[in-house]
Amino acid sequence: MTVYNTTIELFDHFRKIAQEYGCNPCFDGVQEEIHAMNEKGEGETFYCLCKLNTTCPCSKLEAELEKNGVCHCGIFRRVK
């Protein structure tokens, strides 16, 4: 089951959380990735983009991905 059932809910939530992290809230170029995170998500947790072999849509977290190979942000945490 996806985290959000509608695209509006999904993007509103994603932008709000990203803004809290000081990230660029415009994700127009990565809609497919965000939908993939949502579709494979569980409960209230998005699927980690690392498992999709995709760059994190939030530019502020790219350095952490490069350094650690995994997202530690609550938005992107892994779903086991």
Image (tube, rainbow, N blue to C red):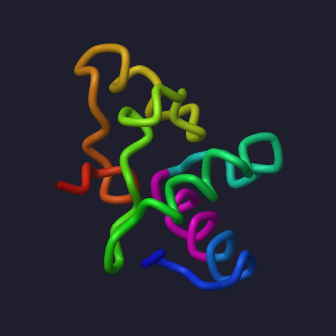
Is 7 left or right of 18, judged from the image as shown? right
Is 14 left or right of 61, judged from the image as shown? right
Q: Main secondary structure of the magenta part?
A: helix
Q: Residue at x 27, y 31 (%)?
A: 70
How many numbered marks does the figure carry? Answer: 0
How far across and down, in percent of the image, does residue 75 sit?
Answer: 39, 58
How far across and down, in percent of the image, does residue 39 sit?
Answer: 52, 64
Q: Is residue 14 magenta?
A: yes
Q: Quadrant of the C terminus?
A: bottom left
Q: Is residue 19 magenta?
A: yes
Residue 32 vertical placement versus 61 (above, below): below
Q: Residue at x 63, y 58 (%)?
A: 35
* Residues rendered magenta in the picture: 13-21
Q: Residue at x 69, y 54 (%)?
A: 25
How far across and down, in percent of the image, does residue 4 sit?
Answer: 54, 80
Report the residue that reaches farthest toward the right: 28
How far across and down, in percent of the image, does residue 58 sit?
Answer: 56, 40
